[in-house]
């Protein structure tokens, strides 16, 4: 796994945990990716910033400052897809209807 992939996966899980804090699988997966970042890539500090269209991750990797930037819609799309698979977190504000109407 490349460092950028591990950061993206960790960030996607962080977004999902923020949205669904009771989702134990998401919490454990976020922890797993953080362990990968720490052990495999020597990431010691990580900070996330957002603007309207992107998410920026500042990290200390092997004692060197690094920055990663991802399109917000890609991060949220993966989190949404994972949420839909788990069905643990209600994502709509309307009541379901019977008969498709």
Image (cartoon, rainbow, N blue to C red):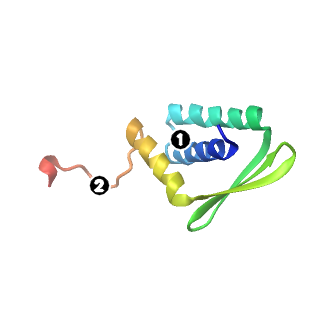
Residue drawn at x 59%, y 63% as measured from the top left: 54
Answer whether residue 21 is visible to the viewer in this image.
Answer: yes
Nearest the eye: 95 or 54: 54
Along the horizontal axis of the image, is 4 left or right of 12? right
Nearest the eye: 58 or 19: 58
**Residue 34 vertical placement versus 79 (above, below):** above
- Distance, label 2 to label 1, CA atoms, is 21 Å
Nearest the eye: 95 or 82: 82
Q: Which residue is mark 2?
A: 94
Estimate the x, y position of residue 84 in percent, counting from the top left. 38, 42
Estimate the x, y position of residue 11 in percent, counting from the top left. 61, 47
Estimate the x, y position of residue 101 in percent, counting from the top left. 14, 55
Residue drawn at x 50%, y 59% as measured from the top left: 73
**Residue 55 vertical placement versus 52 (above, below):** above
Along the horizontal axis of the image, is 29 left or right of 59? left
The quadrant of the rendering that contains the N terminus is top right
Q: Give neighbour class at mark 1: few <14, some 14-19, many 20+ (Cα, 10 Å).
A: few
Residue drawn at x 57%, y 33% as measured from the top left: 29
Nearest the eye: 65 or 21: 65
Residue 83, numbered label? none
Label 2: which secondary element: loop
Residue drawn at x 29%, y 55% as measured from the top left: 94
Mark 1 or mark 2, which is nearer the start of the sequence? 1
Q: Which residue is mark 1?
A: 21
Residue that extends furthest to the right in the rendered view of this protein: 63
Label 1: which secondary element: loop
């Amino acid at each position: 796994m490349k460092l950028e992939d591990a950061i993206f996966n960790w960030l996607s899980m962080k977004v999902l945990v923020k949205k669904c804090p009771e989702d134990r699988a998401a919490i454990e997966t976020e922890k797993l990716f953080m362990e990968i970042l720490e052990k495999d890539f020597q990431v010691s500090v990580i900070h996330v910033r957002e603007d309207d269209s992107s998410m920026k991750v500042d990290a200390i990797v092997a004692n060197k400052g690094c920055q990663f930037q991802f399109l917000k819609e890609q991060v949220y799309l993966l989190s949404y897809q994972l949420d839909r698979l788990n069905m643990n977190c209600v994502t709509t504000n309307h009541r379901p209807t019977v008969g498709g109407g």
